[in-house]
Image (cartoon, grey):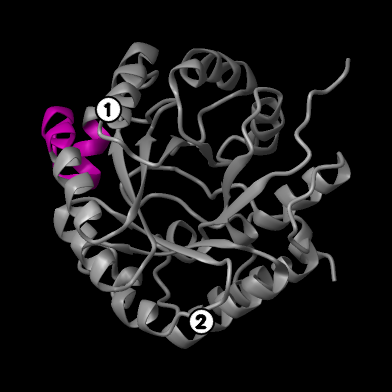
């Protein structure tokens, strides 16, 4: 079998946001800034730094504005943040970010738990969020959450995902993300999803994969066959949604970069340096992380 592999892949580091949002131990802003410096030194060029959400629901993100005020300005580095409503978009814009990531769930149950909105209400809100983002000069990435399955609803109909993709694209977003928020995806499902969705898409596509069932890197390898060259990862494999029971971490940055490197795909990231961030956070949290390679000194 001959693998059809791209020459280069872009990695979006989401450890500061998705990776930490579920952690009870609050990481100091100064530590987060130190991690960002290390990530940049490792070659990471796109970092999702925070989510602009209610700090009572996600206390780890209470320092979103103060963190953004201290971000190192480095040529070629993009900082983005997640927003779930118009107010979150406005906060991201006021904080000086370059891109806002807006999420909409393909699961009605998850949408109600995560954003307090039904699917119909969430779709109505997305248009207003895009308008607000443009008013603040923000690039927009629209993510379809739970695209590959939901712990509350089970399998998500593919035609529902397609309708949501078509809708957000009609709003003129700059990028599309398909999120396996629950870690339920498998390579066959990834292939079917991409076979169906990619021909309809005219903007860059990012996969956001969780490793709940140990299939994260297998799903990356399958997606590469379809020409996907953008992946969200988190140092140490941290992550999980506070409103998805049992959801485990994202695919680990250092593990993903290492696998890509081993099959001849460039990322411009030094996985050894990225793994240093995982060791720092492991010490802060006083526990082992799901990732593998960070344990190798």
Relative to residue 126, is residue 26 drawn left or right?
Answer: right
The image quarter in which residue 166 lies: top left
Query: Which stretch appears magenta?
Result: 109-124
Residue wearing tag 1: 170
- Does residue 30 show up magenta in the picture? no
Dot 1: element:
helix
Give above or below for 144 relative to 249: above
Quarter of the image with the C terminus is bottom right
Q: Residue at x 29, y 24 (%)?
A: 164
Question: Between residues 162 and 214, which one lies in front from this camera angle?
Answer: 162
Label 2 vs 1, first from the N-terminus? 2
Query: Horizontal and vertical percent for residue 125?
Result: 14, 40
The image quarter in which residue 77 lies: bottom right
Give above or below for 8 relative to 46: above
Q: Residue at x 78, y 30 (%)?
A: 5
Residue wearing tag 2: 72
Relative to residue 202, is residue 1 drawn left or right?
Answer: right
Query: Horizontal and vertical percent for residue 264?
Result: 87, 42
Name of the residue lying farthest toward the bottom: 30
């Amino acid at each position: 079998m001959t693998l059809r592999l791209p020459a280069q892949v872009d990695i979006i580091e989401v450890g500061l946001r998705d990776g930490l949002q579920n952690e009870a131990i609050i990481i100091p802003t100064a530590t987060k800034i130190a991690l960002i410096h290390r990530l940049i030194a490792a070659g990471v060029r796109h970092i999702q730094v925070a989510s602009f959400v209610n700090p009572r629901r996600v206390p780890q993100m209470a320092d979103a504005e103060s963190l953004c005020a201290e971000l190192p300005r480095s040529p070629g580095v993009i900082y983005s943040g997640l927003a779930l409503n118009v107010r979150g978009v406005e906060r991201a814009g006021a904080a000086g970010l370059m891109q806002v990531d807006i999420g909409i769930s393909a699961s009605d149950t998850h949408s109600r738990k995560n954003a307090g909105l039904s699917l119909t209400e969430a779709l109505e809100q997305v248009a207003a969020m895009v308008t607000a983002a443009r008013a603040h000069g923000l690039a927009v990435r629209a993510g379809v959450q739970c695209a590959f399955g939901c712990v509350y609803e089970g399998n998500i109909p593919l035609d529902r995902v397609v309708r949501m993709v078509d809708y957000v694209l009609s709003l003129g977003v700059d990028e599309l993300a398909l999120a396996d928020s629950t870690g339920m995806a498998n390579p066959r499902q990834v292939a079917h999803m991409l076979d169906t969705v990619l021909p309809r898409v005219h903007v860059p596509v990012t996969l956001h994969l969780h490793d709940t069932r140990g299939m994260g890197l297998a799903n990356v390898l399958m997606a590469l066959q379809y020409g996907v060259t953008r992946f969200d990862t988190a140092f140490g494999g941290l992550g999980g949604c506070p409103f998805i029971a049992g959801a485990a971490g994202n695919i680990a940055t250092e593990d993903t970069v290492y696998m890509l490197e081993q099959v001849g795909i460039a990322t411009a990231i030094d996985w050894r340096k990225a793994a240093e961030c995982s060791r720092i956070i492991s010490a802060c949290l006083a526990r082992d992380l799901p990732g593998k390679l960070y344990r190798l000194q």
